[in-house]
Amino acid sequence: MSTKFENVPTVTIVRIPKFKAVSTGYYTVEEDNRLWDSWFNWIDEHENLLPWGLLPHGLDFALTKNGKLSKICAIKDDVKKTDVAPYEIIEMKGGLYATAISYESYSDSLLKFEDRIMKWLKNSNFIYDEEREIMGENINDDEEIYKGLECYQFLKYVPIKLRTF
């Protein structure tokens, strides 16, 4: 898919701390539309479980694995399994990530955009860390930004580690 932003991605390296998260578990892209509203309604109703006030929901990501998606959101360390029902609690390892902005549709962005980051990694001092999951984050829920860009923006986070020579 070619867009007016085709050559925009600049890779940035970030460190995300380890954190405890509530997770939807994995589901197909087709199921995503059905689950989207219920997930964010649940998050809004349980704001007291979130560790800090970043907008809109703190550390809030979509993970990809084997062509499926999972939504996660950071929660306070003292949150119990019963507090997050019907969802589950997971531990995110944190670590280094190569990140870049995607200007594509939601499912294209989450499942395909990492190819550009992977190409960048080939000529860097980093390699893909297969022990952690690729993550995505919607960064513009703002209607004015959407109208100005004529698309959504997503940050992709590809887990990386130093290349050993």
Image (cartoon, rainbow, N blue to C red):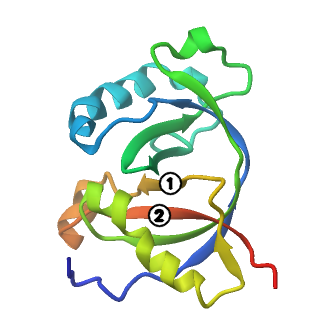
Q: Position of residue 142 (x, y in %)?
A: 30, 54
Looking at this view, is 22 or 63 the one in front?
Answer: 63
Looking at this view, is 75 or 87 the one in front?
Answer: 87
Q: Position of residue 79 (x, y in %)?
A: 67, 19
Q: Amino acid at mark 1?
A: Met
Q: Amino acid at mark 2?
A: Lys
Q: Quadrant of the rendered structure where residue 114 is?
A: bottom left
Q: Are circles 1 and 2 on residues that touch, CB within 8 Å?
A: yes
Q: Position of residue 164 (x, y in %)?
A: 81, 79
User: As drawn, is 63 to the left or to the right of 14?
Assistant: left
- Quadrant of the snapshot with the N terminus: bottom left
Q: Residue at x 66, y 75 (%)?
A: 127
Q: Residue at x 53, y 17 (%)?
A: 84
Looking at this view, is 2 or 4 the one in front?
Answer: 2
Q: Quadrant of the rendered structure where residue 27 is?
A: top left
Considering the numbered disc 2 on the image, is that residue within a helix, a strand or a loop? strand
The residue that label 1 is drawn on is: 135
Disc on the earlier residue, 1 or 2:
1
Q: Residue at x 68, y 28 (%)?
A: 76
- Quadrant of the snapshot with the C terminus: bottom right
Crowd class of label 2 (few under 14; some 14 to 19; many from 20; radius 10 Å): many
Instruction: Tell which residue pokes out farthest to the top in this image.
Output: 82
Q: Quadrant of the rendered structure where residue 160 is?
A: bottom right
Q: Position of residue 141 (x, y in %)?
A: 32, 51
Distance, label 1 to label 2, CA atoms, is 6 Å
The residue that label 2 is drawn on is: 156
